[in-house]
Amino acid sequence: DEEALSVVRRLRAAGLATDVDHRFGAVGKQMKRANKLGARVVVLLGEDEQKAGVASVKDMASGTQARVPLVDLPEAVRRLLGPRSA
């Protein structure tokens, strides 16, 4: 999906390592994969999020999840990752 690839490019341009699950399977399976890979933050960009111009951002350690405007996404991810991401 072009919007998802645009988000990935923005995150990478901001110096944030990203991985994309191109299989578009069940969200639960994708979250298990992210956990197995040691992801600290997961960005979900489904159809509803795209229509609203937001992404769902999940902190894997705490389990909290929030919707973040796409323009604010790199900074929101960086805040969750903490000082090591700067």
Image: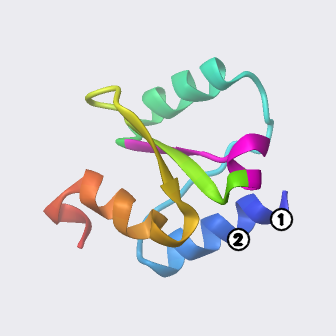
Q: Is residue 50 magenta?
A: yes
Q: Is residue 9 left or right of residue 61?
A: right
Q: Is residue 22 magenta?
A: no
- Vertical placement of 8 versus 25: above or below? below
The residue positioned 69% from the left and 53% from the top of the image is 52
Q: Is residue 82 left or right of residue 31?
A: left
Residue 1 location in percent, x, y? 84, 56
- Vertical placement of 68 versus 83: above or below? above
* Amino acid type, label 2: Ser
The residue positioned 41% from the left and 76% from the top of the image is 15
Kindly identify which numbered label has been placed on residue 57.
Answer: none
Q: Mark 2 touching mark 1, by CB under 8 A?
A: yes
Quadrant location, the C terminus: bottom left
- Determine which quarter of the picture holds residue 35: top left
Residue bounds of the magenta highlight: 41-51
User: Which residue is under mark 2?
Assistant: 6
Cα distance, mark 2 to mark 1?
Answer: 6 Å
Q: Count neighbours of disc 1 (C-alpha within 10 A) and say few if under 14, some if 14 to 19, many if 20 or more.
A: few
The residue positioned 73% from the left and 21% from the top of the image is 26
The residue positioned 79% from the left and 43% from the top of the image is 47
* Amino acid type, label 1: Glu
Residue situated in front as seen by the camera: 64 or 18: 64
Element carrying mark 1: helix
Kindly identify which numbered label has been placed on residue 2.
Answer: 1
Residue 53 location in percent, x, y? 66, 60
Residue 50 location in percent, x, y? 73, 53
- Vertical placement of 37 versus 10: above or below? above
Q: Count neighbours of disc 2 (C-alpha within 10 A) and say few if under 14, some if 14 to 19, many if 20 or more.
A: few
